[in-house]
Amino acid sequence: MELTQLKGIGKTTAEKLEQLGIRDVMDLLFHLPLRYEDKTKITAIDDLQGFSHAQVEGEITHSYVTQGRRPILVCEIDDGSGNMQLKFFNFYYSQKIKMRAGLKVRAFGEVRHGMYGMEIIHPEFSLGEDQPPLAETLTPIYPKSEGVSQKLLQKAAAQAIQLLQAGAFELDELLPAQWLSAQQLPTLKAALIQVHTPPPELNVNQLMTMSHPAQIRLKIEEILAHFLAMHQARTAIQQHQAVAMPISEADHQAMLERLPFELTGAQQRVVAEIHQDLAKPMPMQRLVQGDVGSGKTVVAALAIQAALRAGKQAVMMAPTEILAEQHLLTMRDYFPQEQLVFLSGKIKGQERAEALTAIAGQGNIIIGTHALFQTEVVYRDLALVIIDEQHRFGVHQRLQLKHKGKQHDQLPHNLIMTATPIPRTLAQIAYANLDVSVIDELPPNRKVINTVLLENSKMPQLAERIRSACQRGEQAYWVCTLIEESEHLRAKAAQDTFDELTASFPDLKVGLIHGRQKADEKQLVMDRFKANEIHLLVATTVIEVGVDVPNASLMVIDNAERLGLSQLHQLRGRVGRGNRQSHCVLMYQAPLSENAQIRLQTMRSTNDGFEIARQDLKLRGPGEILGTRQKGSMEFRFSNPEQDAQLFQQAKILAADLMKDNPEVCERIIQRWQHQAGELAKV
Ligand code: ADP
Ligand code: MG
């Protein structure tokens, strides 16, 4: 049913609603309230509590405008139980005249503790003796966007509900009736009516905390749609063929013998899982999760080995130039006989032409950045795609690369490696379309990194520490964190720090690396750092991922309070890679915000990536953890992966049953929630 059939909605409004993803009346019904306001009662001023929404009614005793640069209209009101202030920062002079002493006023808003008792800033209000009757039901508050008022959404939704109740259109129940009654959950129709127009007798508390059965009913279907869509995406890929690349035990052993270390138990297990996948004529879809330093690169190498033995090409893509270069060096060590090709945005002209020729020809291990999936890059015979640190890539980029290898209905095998240790519960949701392997063990002899916090002003203490570490033959990083968006300013800050440190340590060799340098310049610095020709390396956060210099044992991060937990953890993971005791000094500028305090304390108290991820999840919420906020890939409009963990479990089981019993219904549930199901599902 068309939106314009509703009263009060013309063409322009309909267009604005479309920007919210609301294209018809049905969409409007699925645009669910985010919260509710309780205007069913008046609270006595004496009973008000701060930081909550309330409605009050009283007489204006005094109304005045404060003097100062920014005048404020203040209305003092009294209801017999006590008095409080209503404050307006933006007001018309006519409003001041209207809000005169002696008048009755009803006001609604967020109550706060003010200088003179309770106050509400910019309340909704109405003046006069004859106030309208109190609302009979909770008032739904919708997520809104520019140009569409809350009032309009409320009216439109109320009309949509009336039409639904009048049977003006069909709304099919897609969940099994038996299951619903066993769970004591309402039908979809009843649930929608209740959440949009909650009747007075509905449990207010449940509704406010999003735990009413009607809300749970809707969440379940939303989550269900997510799992079904993920599963559908997975099945769609499994329809394709892939080259089976079994690797012989002899070939595998030969490679293991060339390694300078023995694999940990966890690495052996994960490699075995990958080799099993690769041996099948069906595209692998596996995610390897492993904390920083857990040794993911060698696992990737052992996967590449299988592709090489099958005579195929493997590509490994990294999110940054530096990381890609690092992988190139490592893979050269592991595969001295093979033809490696490097491609990134910075490779230009003749060099680029040569790289492209090699990729279409004899090259068999191809390493680089996102430049690898530009349309002009043509692969000879790509059978394995490895993506390192996948959370940094946009969904579409991954998709493109996958299609690169598509030949005669065959897809390449896919391996995604991530160091973002997201909690298992979240992983199950986000990666429901992937098989997950976890490297849950660090290589032996790793010492726990000792982390200390140091105020910026205590810098002199630090200088001694750096000097003595370097004199012992160890090496140190100094990471400059500048939040500036511009790479240029970041580089400049690093340059300044470099100049200062060079002056303070005439006896040490100080190096500098940042994102504005040319690829070969960076390479040179990294090579010299690796060879211990540089003692102290000043860097921007470009070294965040992947740099591997086991002899580095000290890391200083200046203004660490500016960084998020996972970024700090990644950075710290650059030390503690050898077997000597390593240290990480987090410098900070006091005073710290509460949130920054928690972050730094967390870093000090634990080295465990999963523990840090849990804390991060608490501080930031799931959308941001997955780095998908802008990409909209894990957006549940209604459900919350953390708070609704139990519902996710239930929905998962239900999804499995439905897929078995009723694939047609599954398809329809996905369709219905398509907006919500998310982009990730389509990958
Ligand atoms: P990440 O998982 O962070 O990518 P890397 O693959 O860079 O970790 O490995 C970190 C360091 O540990 C490297 O120097 C690597 O050579 C080393 N390493 C990896 N596996 C082992 C192992 N089983 N025993 C000893 N050292 C290992
Ligand atoms: Mg790595």
Image (cartoon, rainbow, N blue to C red):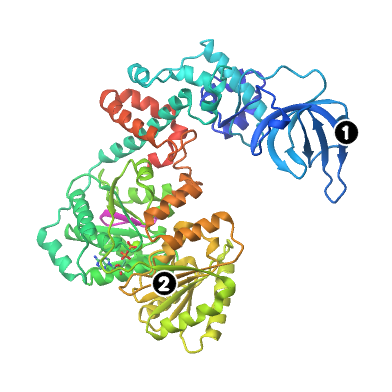
Tell me which corner region of the image, top left, top right, bottom left or bottom right, holds residue 678.
Answer: top left
The magenta segment is: 373-389
Q: Amino acid at mark 1?
A: Ser
311 with respect to 168 (left or right)? left
Q: Position of residue 510 (x, y in %)?
A: 48, 82
Relative to 429, is 490 above or below?
below
Q: CA distance from mark 2 to mark 1?
A: 65 Å
Relative to 124, is 196 above or below?
above
Q: Residue furthest top?
A: 166
Kindly identify the residue that appears in the image at 25 percent across and 41 percent down. 240
Q: Amino acid at mark 2?
A: His
Count of marks, rendered view: 2
Instruction: For the residues labelled 2 and 1, say whether their Cβ atoms are less than 8 Å apart.
Output: no
Of pointers 2 and 1, the one earlier in the residue sequence: 1
Q: Quadrant of the N terminus?
A: top right
Tell me which corner region of the image, top left, top right, bottom left or bottom right, holds residue 357.
Answer: bottom left
Q: Which residue is mark 2?
A: 583
Q: Position of residue 655 (x, y in %)?
A: 32, 30
Please tell me which residue lies in front, 679 or 582.
582
Which structural element holds mark 1?
helix
Q: Residues within 10 Å of mark 1 (few under 14, many from 20)?
A: few
Q: Position of residue 157 (x, y in %)?
A: 59, 22
Instruction: Answer whether residue 375 is visible to the viewer in this image.
Output: no
Q: Residue furthest bottom?
A: 507
Please tell me which residue lies in front, 651 or 529.
651
Q: Which residue is mark 1?
A: 94
2 vs 1, front mark: 2
